[in-house]
Amino acid sequence: MEPLDILLNAYEGATEGWLADSLAAGQSLFRRLAALELVVFGFVVALKSRSVETVFPELAWKLFLIALFLTALLLYPLWVPTITPTFAAVAGDITGFTTLNPILVVKQGIALALALLFASISSGLIFPDPFGATLGLFVAFGIVAAFIAIAAIITKTLIESWIVVSAGPFFFGFAPFRLTAPIADNFIVYAFQVGIKLFFLIVLLAAARGVVIEWVQLIFISGVYNLQLILELLAGAIILAVALWAIPAKLADVLTRSWQLGLRQALGE
């Protein structure tokens, strides 16, 4: 088994076992904060010296909201864990590309770097020229580093998707109290952000899946007789890494920037 495969399996396996405990912790937190919200509501009513006729509808509305939030928490395993897989599945249906595999990405980077070094050595560009040797090794290292960065981006997003599912019930437990409700609100938005990032990662990787093969073919066809080509390959790898790092995160931020569920506002009414 690959070292990176062991890392991914460790995170995925660990997070799968957290859901039940996280749900129990979220329910315990929810009960305490719901009681605190009712106490605060009672103090507000007492300070304003309001009549029972005006207070009863507000109390009924608050109890309804708390019951609604509790139902959402109890049914958490049926809805939040479907958010990120749904985005990934839709992206796969659109592109025909369904696998986010950081291990394969690293191997592609290493294969591209080795192909570059082999072709450069065969053409006499690198050895025995010390400058060519230094440049060739620098470019090969840069290409591998760029593909490792891409693999890191994929790994980070996958881990985020697993943590969102497993740790989410605890953060949703903050929902019934007006001062902590934004935590639950922001968590739901974050779950959608992770799903959107997965969607665009799959889309971008689907568009670039044949790039490495074409680059390797270009290396052996051209023979790498000029420095311009190897520098362009390095630039291409870096640009690809930057695009995969910036575009999904930017789009997820733009699409959810002004979106709030308004839990605090609802409780404060």
Image (tube, helix red, strand yellow):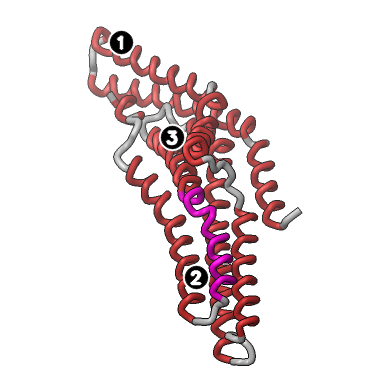
Establish if 128 lies above or below 206. Answer: below
Residue located at (57% from left, 81% from top) = 136
- Report the disc number at residue 233: 2
Neighbourhood count class around disc 2 (C-alpha, 10 Å): few under 14, some 14–19, many 20 upward: many
Neighbourhood count class around disc 1 (C-alpha, 10 Å): few under 14, some 14–19, many 20 upward: few
- Report the disc number at residue 145: none
> To which residue does mark 3 refer?
188
Residue 214 among magenta residues: yes
- Report the disc number at residue 56: 1
Residue 255 among magenta residues: no
Which quadrant of the structure image shows residue 107? Answer: bottom right
What span is colored magenta in the figure? 204-222
54 or 89: nearer the eye?
Answer: 89
Measured as percent of width and height from the top left, residue 201 is found at: 48, 48
Secondary structure beneath dot 1 equals: helix
Circle 3: residue type: Ile
Measured as percent of width and height from the top left, residue 154 is found at: 54, 52
Measured as percent of width and height from the top left, residue 9 is found at: 69, 46
